[in-house]
Amino acid sequence: MVKRCEWLTKDPLYITYHDEEWGVPLHDDRMLFEFLILEGAQAGLSWLTVLKKRDHYRKVFNNFDAGRIAKYDRKKVAELLSDPGIIRNRLKIDAAVQNAKAFLKVRKEFKSFNEYIWQFTGSKPKINRYKKLSDIPARTEESVLMSRDLKKRGFKFVGPTICYAFMQATGMVNDHTTDCFRYKELNQKAQRGQKG
């Protein structure tokens, strides 16, 4: 019997996400942008809800191409608001457009968004040692700093809790509990400087 993090449900999509993606260090700008938008879309909802809509999000949000999303006009936003395949919240959709613009500015300043965002963990994954779900914080000092800096740069839906969920998802921190099979795997790969 494989031991996994206790927050998981029995949903096969969720299990695959946990086993293959969650906590894997991400350095691809497009994927980092995708997670930033989806974590914001998740606010107040479960991650599984967003995960089930992710493929459709990719389709209607031009595969999270920030350059294209930054140019979305009122007509495109109205189109998105009438699409039942995504979370139809005007503030979250407007935030995606605003975040695309802010993302492009950061990328221009730092050469890549990856270079910018990973500075909050010293450019390497932070290995935590949480034994159970109740030990894992909703926010940390790093996520508070990240949130503050992102907001200063014009990003929306990037509170400290959303930022910490983003850090967990993109492998900036390893928050698999110590009894989960992925905890050891990811730590070994981090020590060898490998991905996933």
Image (cartoon, grey):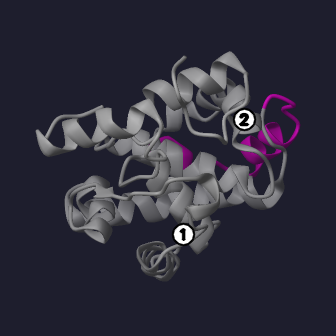
What residue sits 88% from the left and 37% below the top?
Answer: 82
Amino acid of disc 1: Phe
The location of residue 1, given as percent across then percent down, is 55, 17
What residue sits 57% from the left and 53% below the top?
Answer: 132
* Element type at mark 2: helix
Question: Is any atom of residue 102 visible in this view?
Answer: yes
Q: Are marks 2 and 1 in contact (CB under 8 Å)?
A: no
Residue occupying the far left of the picture: 192
Q: Nearer the viewer, residue 7 or 3?
A: 3
How packed mark 1 is, by other alpha carbons closer than 10 Å (few <14, some 14-19, many 20 or more), is many
Residue 46 falls in image quadrant = top right
Q: Report whether 187 appears left or right of 72.
A: left
What residue sits 70% from the left and 50% below the top?
Answer: 41
Amino acid of disc 2: Leu
Q: Nearer the viewer, residue 193 or 52?
A: 193
Between discs 2 and 1, the one toward the N terminus = 2
* Residue 81 within the segment the image draws in magenta: yes
Residue 13 falls in image quadrant = top right
* Residue 127 within the segment the image draws in magenta: no
The location of residue 166, given as percent across then percent down, is 51, 54
* Element type at mark 1: loop
Residue beneath label 2, please? 48
* Numbered disc in front, either 2 or 1: 2
Residue beneath label 1, please? 155
What residue sits 24% from the left and 68% below the top?
Answer: 109
The location of residue 174, given as percent across then percent down, is 39, 50
Q: Report whether 109 appears left or right of 21.
A: left
Vertical relation: 24 (above or below) 144: above
Q: Which residues are magenta?
A: 67-85
The image's mark for residue 143 is none
The location of residue 12, given as percent across then percent down, is 66, 16
Residue 94 falls in image quadrant = bottom right
